[in-house]
Image (cartoon, grey):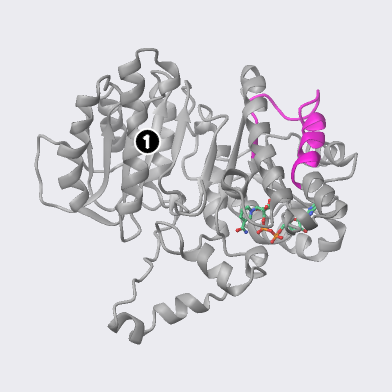
């Protein structure tokens, strides 16, 4: 996607006059080290020792706060999960501030805490909630592609925390900044770390182009057999995507009453099972609220929300998705912060977040996780249509000072889909570079 503004600000003249330069983000490459530089692990929480031993197993050098070094750090992991009093928060500053000064380009700060919702002591709840304020503020201070994120553990088991730490350290999370993810109990890990989705059958709607095409490509790269779904009018582009990734194409409008049944029949009939569904198909039909007509309103609500509810009924019925499956929705920051001209779209995407909340709670017994990504400004055909000035504001007004790429959304979805992410459910993770717009 052409980004005229980036071309201009990266020009020699712009560099000479001191225009801030967005950093090239480190993105995931299968097989590449999680971090090129050592990782400081500190904080005396209940996951600290396990994280050190796991990082060592995967070949990452770790340093502790007792072994001072002046080397560059690839990441700083601060485990404050045991903190119960606000006075203990000072550890973050005392250990974290000098470490953050040594953070490499594209470095990572990962804070691990305890989900305040699992605590009753008021001081402990306040202390754990305070971690969110630290991380969201630090994300806004870090530069050179570095990010800060928070993992809140709901239990004692290390596997879910480890899966989230792995995601945040890796290039998969390049455009995820200033966010909070909650993880529950699980012992699941990825049997094949290089191709974690091997043996899985995944359906991706809206897969003919943009973010959906990238999701299909990334899931296939990670080992899944992919069914690419889109409207008949996008049939040629859909066939190209499906052929390129060795998957199959299914032409179906997601708003059709039988869309869910056709998806299940195709996945199970052609590929034997259905393990992962990514509800990505979506449209915008912007208009100010006072001028919003019936077609714009109904169309957006039905494609972006109503169709997902209907398809899920068929997908979750007997003979549909396997237990232990994954449902991932594509929401939007417009569903969190709202957006001028997008009452219909904001409603549909906020509704998707409600769906994730309610359905994840219902499907815990079957081991099916339900999560969403909420993309911010992502460089696609959809955002290329936004008027120039609005587009440039959307693109720059985030902590990473640039738009994200479809791959950033796809990598987050691929993480949710992993067997090792079994402890992650009911989460809405913003892939927005910590957008500064709105709520
Ligand atoms: P896009 O318009 O480039 O692609 C959307 C795809 O969905 C198209 O291939 C289209 O044919 C398909 N589609 C639309 N209606 C359909 C229907 N009824 N049945 C089947 N397929 C249908 O959009 P994108 O930018 O790639 O967006 C993908 C998703 O990400 C959407 O849900 C969108 O709301 C969301 N999103 C995008 C951004 C962004 O910055 N691009 C930001 C937030 C959220």
Q: Residue furthest front?
A: 290
Find out whether residue 175 is within the magenta segment.
no
Q: Which residue is mark 1?
A: 132
User: For the magenta stretch, what is the residue range?
Assistant: 304-328
- Mark 1 burial class by Cα count in 10 Å: few <14, some 14-19, many 20+: many
Of residues 45 and 22, which is closer to you in this image? 22
Residue 201 in the image: state x and y as whole percent. 69, 40
Quarter of the image where one finds residue 351: top right
Q: Position of residue 336 (x, y in %)?
A: 58, 43
Q: Secondary structure at mark 1?
A: helix
Where does ligand 1 appear, by image quarter?
bottom right
* Residue 363: quadrant of the picture: top right
Work out whether residue 438 or residue 182 is closer to the camera in this orientation and state it: 438
Q: Quadrant of the N terminus?
A: bottom right
Against 409, residue 383 (above or below) is below
Tell me if residue 200 can be seen.
Answer: no
State left or right for residue 99 relative to residue 144. left
185 left or right of 114 in image: right
**Residue 319 sits inside the magenta stretch:** yes
Q: Position of residue 416 (x, y in %)?
A: 55, 38
Q: Position of residue 252 (x, y in %)?
A: 85, 50
Image check: 133 left or right of 303? left
Q: Is residue 424 above or below residue 280?
A: above
Above or below, comparing residue 59 to residue 325 in the picture: below
Residue beneath the point at 45% across and 49% down? 176
């Amino acid at each position: 996607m052409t980004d005229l503004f980036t071309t201009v600000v990266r020009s020699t003249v712009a560099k000479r006059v001191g225009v801030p330069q967005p950093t090239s983000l480190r993105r995931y490459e299968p097989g590449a080290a999680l971090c090129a530089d050592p990782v400081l692990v500190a904080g005396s929480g209940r996951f600290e020792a396990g994280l050190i031993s796991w990082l060592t197993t995967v070949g990452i050098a770790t340093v502790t706060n007792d072994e001072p070094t002046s080397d560059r750090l690839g990441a700083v992991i601060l485990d404050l999960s045991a903190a119960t009093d606000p006075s203990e928060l000072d550890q973050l500053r005392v250990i974290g501030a000098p470490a953050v000064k040594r953070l490499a380009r594209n470095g990572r700060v990962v804070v691990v805490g305890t989900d305040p919702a699992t605590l009753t002591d008021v001081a402990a709840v306040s202390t754990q909630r305070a971690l969110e304020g630290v991380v969201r503020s630090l994300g806004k201070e870090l530069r050179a592609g570095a990010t800060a994120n928070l993992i809140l553990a709901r239990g004692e088991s290390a596997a879910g925390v480890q899966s989230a730490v792995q995601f945040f350290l890796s290039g998969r999370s390049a455009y995820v900044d200033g966010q909070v993810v909650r993880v529950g109990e699980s012992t699941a890990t990825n049997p094949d770390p290089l191709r974690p989705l091997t043996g899985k059958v995944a359906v991706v709607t809206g897969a003919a182009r943009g973010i959906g095409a990238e999701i299909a490509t990334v899931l296939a790269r990670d080992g899944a057999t992919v069914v690419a779904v889109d409207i008949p009018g996008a049939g040629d582009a859909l066939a190209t995507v499906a052929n390129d990734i060795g998957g199959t194409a299914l032409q179906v409008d997601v708003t059709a009453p039988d869309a869910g049944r056709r998806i299940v029949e195709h996945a199970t009939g052609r590929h034997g099972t259905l393990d992962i569904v990514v509800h990505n198909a979506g449209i915008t039909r912007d208009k100010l609220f006072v001028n919003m007509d019936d077609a714009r309103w109904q169309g957006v609500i039905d494609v972006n929300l109503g169709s997902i509810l209907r398809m899920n009924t068929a997908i979750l019925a007997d003979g549909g998705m396997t237990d232990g499956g994954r449902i991932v929705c594509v929401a939007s920051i417009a569903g969190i912060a709202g957006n001028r001209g997008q009452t219909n779209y904001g409603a549909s995407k906020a509704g998707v977040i409600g769906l994730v909340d309610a359905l994840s709670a219902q499907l815990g017994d079957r081991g099916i996780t339900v999560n969403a990504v909420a993309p911010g400004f992502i460089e696609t055909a959809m955002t290329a249509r936004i008027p120039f000035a609005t587009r440039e504001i959307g693109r720059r007004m985030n902590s990473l000072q640039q738009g994200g790429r479809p791959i950033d959304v796809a990598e987050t979805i691929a993480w949710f889909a992993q067997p090792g992410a079994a402890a992650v459910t009911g989460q809405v993770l913003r892939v927005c570079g910590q957008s500064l717009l709105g709520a």
